[in-house]
Image (cartoon, grey):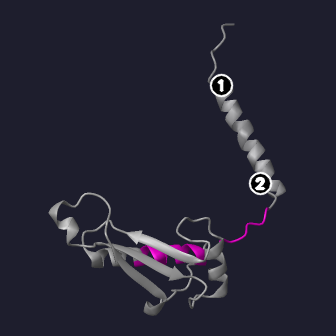
Protein backbone atom coordinates (compact mmCIF):
# COMPACT_ATOMS: atom_id res chain seq x y z
CA UNK A 1 0.00 0.00 0.00
CA UNK A 2 1.63 3.29 -1.07
CA UNK A 3 2.39 5.83 1.61
CA UNK A 4 1.70 9.51 0.99
CA UNK A 5 4.89 11.57 1.03
CA UNK A 6 5.20 14.23 3.72
CA UNK A 7 4.09 17.73 2.77
CA UNK A 8 6.92 19.58 1.07
CA UNK A 9 7.04 23.31 1.61
CA UNK A 10 8.17 25.58 -1.21
CA UNK A 11 9.79 28.83 -0.20
CA UNK A 12 8.56 31.94 -1.99
CA UNK A 13 12.12 33.14 -2.70
CA UNK A 14 13.00 29.85 -4.48
CA UNK A 15 10.31 30.33 -7.15
CA UNK A 16 10.68 33.03 -9.78
CA UNK A 17 7.65 34.35 -11.68
CA UNK A 18 7.88 36.31 -14.92
CA UNK A 19 4.79 37.82 -16.55
CA UNK A 20 4.82 37.32 -20.32
CA UNK A 21 2.44 37.87 -23.19
CA UNK A 22 0.11 34.96 -23.70
CA UNK A 23 -0.17 33.29 -27.08
CA UNK A 24 -3.30 33.09 -29.15
CA UNK A 25 -6.19 35.38 -29.88
CA UNK A 26 -6.95 38.20 -27.48
CA UNK A 27 -8.82 40.85 -29.39
CA UNK A 28 -8.31 44.50 -28.43
CA UNK A 29 -7.17 43.56 -24.94
CA UNK A 30 -4.11 41.61 -26.11
CA UNK A 31 -1.83 44.66 -26.39
CA UNK A 32 -2.57 45.88 -22.86
CA UNK A 33 -2.41 42.75 -20.73
CA UNK A 34 0.37 40.23 -20.10
CA UNK A 35 -1.61 37.38 -18.68
CA UNK A 36 0.73 34.39 -18.91
CA UNK A 37 3.27 33.31 -16.31
CA UNK A 38 6.66 31.67 -16.65
CA UNK A 39 7.58 29.91 -13.41
CA UNK A 40 11.25 29.10 -12.94
CA UNK A 41 12.45 26.81 -10.14
CA UNK A 42 16.14 25.94 -9.74
CA UNK A 43 16.26 22.38 -8.41
CA UNK A 44 19.91 22.50 -7.32
CA UNK A 45 19.55 25.72 -5.32
CA UNK A 46 16.28 24.69 -3.67
CA UNK A 47 15.74 23.50 -0.11
CA UNK A 48 14.25 20.17 -1.21
CA UNK A 49 15.72 16.95 0.21
CA UNK A 50 18.59 15.54 -1.86
CA UNK A 51 16.76 12.34 -2.89
CA UNK A 52 13.85 14.37 -4.32
CA UNK A 53 16.28 16.66 -6.15
CA UNK A 54 17.95 13.62 -7.71
CA UNK A 55 14.63 12.12 -8.83
CA UNK A 56 13.49 15.45 -10.28
CA UNK A 57 16.70 15.77 -12.29
CA UNK A 58 16.31 12.20 -13.60
CA UNK A 59 12.80 12.85 -14.94
CA UNK A 60 12.44 12.64 -18.70
CA UNK A 61 10.27 15.73 -18.63
CA UNK A 62 10.45 18.59 -21.10
CA UNK A 63 9.82 21.08 -18.27
CA UNK A 64 13.15 20.24 -16.61
CA UNK A 65 16.05 21.84 -18.49
CA UNK A 66 19.60 20.49 -18.78
CA UNK A 67 20.67 23.12 -16.23
CA UNK A 68 18.32 21.65 -13.62
CA UNK A 69 15.71 24.40 -13.83
CA UNK A 70 12.00 23.63 -13.97
CA UNK A 71 10.20 25.98 -16.37
CA UNK A 72 6.39 25.97 -16.34
CA UNK A 73 4.31 28.20 -18.59
CA UNK A 74 0.75 28.87 -17.42
CA UNK A 75 -1.67 30.70 -19.69
CA UNK A 76 -4.96 28.85 -19.43
CA UNK A 77 -6.70 31.56 -17.36
CA UNK A 78 -7.35 35.21 -18.18
CA UNK A 79 -6.18 36.38 -14.78
CA UNK A 80 -2.47 36.68 -14.06
CA UNK A 81 -3.02 35.62 -10.45
CA UNK A 82 -4.93 32.46 -11.44
CA UNK A 83 -2.16 31.55 -13.88
CA UNK A 84 0.34 32.06 -11.05
CA UNK A 85 -1.64 29.69 -8.81
CA UNK A 86 -1.97 27.19 -11.67
CA UNK A 87 1.80 27.17 -12.28
CA UNK A 88 2.51 26.67 -8.56
CA UNK A 89 0.01 23.79 -8.43
CA UNK A 90 1.69 22.12 -11.41
CA UNK A 91 5.11 22.54 -9.76
CA UNK A 92 3.82 20.96 -6.55
CA UNK A 93 2.39 18.03 -8.53
CA UNK A 94 5.74 17.50 -10.24
CA UNK A 95 7.57 17.54 -6.89
CA UNK A 96 4.97 15.18 -5.35
CA UNK A 97 5.51 12.77 -8.25
CA UNK A 98 9.24 12.83 -7.52
CA UNK A 99 8.66 12.37 -3.78
CA UNK A 100 6.57 9.21 -4.27
CA UNK A 101 8.70 6.07 -4.05
CA UNK A 102 6.89 2.93 -5.19
CA UNK A 103 7.18 -0.11 -2.96
CA UNK A 104 9.50 -2.69 -4.50
CA UNK A 105 7.57 -5.86 -5.28
CA UNK A 106 9.23 -9.10 -4.31
CA UNK A 107 8.10 -11.98 -6.49
CA UNK A 108 6.42 -14.74 -4.51
CA UNK A 109 5.43 -18.29 -5.31
CA UNK A 110 1.86 -19.51 -4.72
CA UNK A 111 1.47 -22.11 -1.97
CA UNK A 112 0.86 -25.74 -2.87
CA UNK A 113 -2.71 -25.60 -1.53
CA UNK A 114 -3.43 -22.49 -3.61
CA UNK A 115 -2.16 -24.27 -6.73
CA UNK A 116 -4.32 -27.30 -5.91
CA UNK A 117 -7.46 -25.14 -5.39
CA UNK A 118 -6.83 -23.38 -8.69
CA UNK A 119 -6.55 -26.63 -10.65
CA UNK A 120 -9.64 -28.09 -8.93
CA UNK A 121 -11.72 -25.01 -9.75
CA UNK A 122 -10.59 -25.21 -13.39
CA UNK A 123 -11.60 -28.89 -13.55
CA UNK A 124 -15.01 -28.09 -12.02
CA UNK A 125 -15.54 -25.27 -14.48
CA UNK A 126 -14.59 -27.59 -17.35
CA UNK A 127 -17.16 -30.17 -16.21
CA UNK A 128 -19.89 -27.52 -16.15
CA UNK A 129 -19.03 -26.59 -19.72
CA UNK A 130 -19.01 -30.23 -20.87
CA UNK A 131 -22.53 -30.69 -19.42
CA UNK A 132 -23.76 -27.80 -21.57
CA UNK A 133 -23.14 -29.88 -24.68
CA UNK A 134 -25.78 -31.48 -26.90
CA UNK A 135 -27.67 -34.41 -25.41
CA UNK A 136 -27.01 -37.51 -27.57
CA UNK A 137 -29.84 -39.88 -28.53
CA UNK A 138 -29.45 -43.44 -27.27
* Quadrant of residue 62 within the rendered picture: bottom right
Which residue is identified by label 1?
131
Q: Position of residue 20 (x, y in %)?
A: 34, 73
* Quadrant of residue 85 within the rendered picture: bottom left
| Residue farthest left in this picture | 28
From where the camera sits, is residue 63 visible?
A: yes
Name the residue: 63% across, 75% down.
Answer: 57
Give 27 or 84, whichever is nearer the viewer.
27
- Horizontal arrangement in the rendering, residue 73 relative to residue 27 (left or right): right
Give 41 or 132, whichever is nearer the viewer.
41
From where the camera sits, is residue 100 visible?
A: no
| Residue farthest top in this picture | 138
Main SS of the magenta segment? helix
Which residue is identified by label 2?
114
- Over which residues does the magenta segment extend? 88-107
* Quadrant of residue 88 within the rendered picture: bottom left
Q: Residues within 10 Å of mark 1 (few under 14, many from 20)?
A: few
Q: Position of residue 16 (x, y in %)?
A: 43, 84
Name the residue: 57% across, 65% down.
Answer: 61
Amino acid sequence: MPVNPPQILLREEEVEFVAIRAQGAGGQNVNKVSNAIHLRFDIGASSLPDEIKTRLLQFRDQRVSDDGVVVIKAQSHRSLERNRIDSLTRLRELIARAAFVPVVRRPTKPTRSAQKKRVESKVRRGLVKVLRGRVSDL
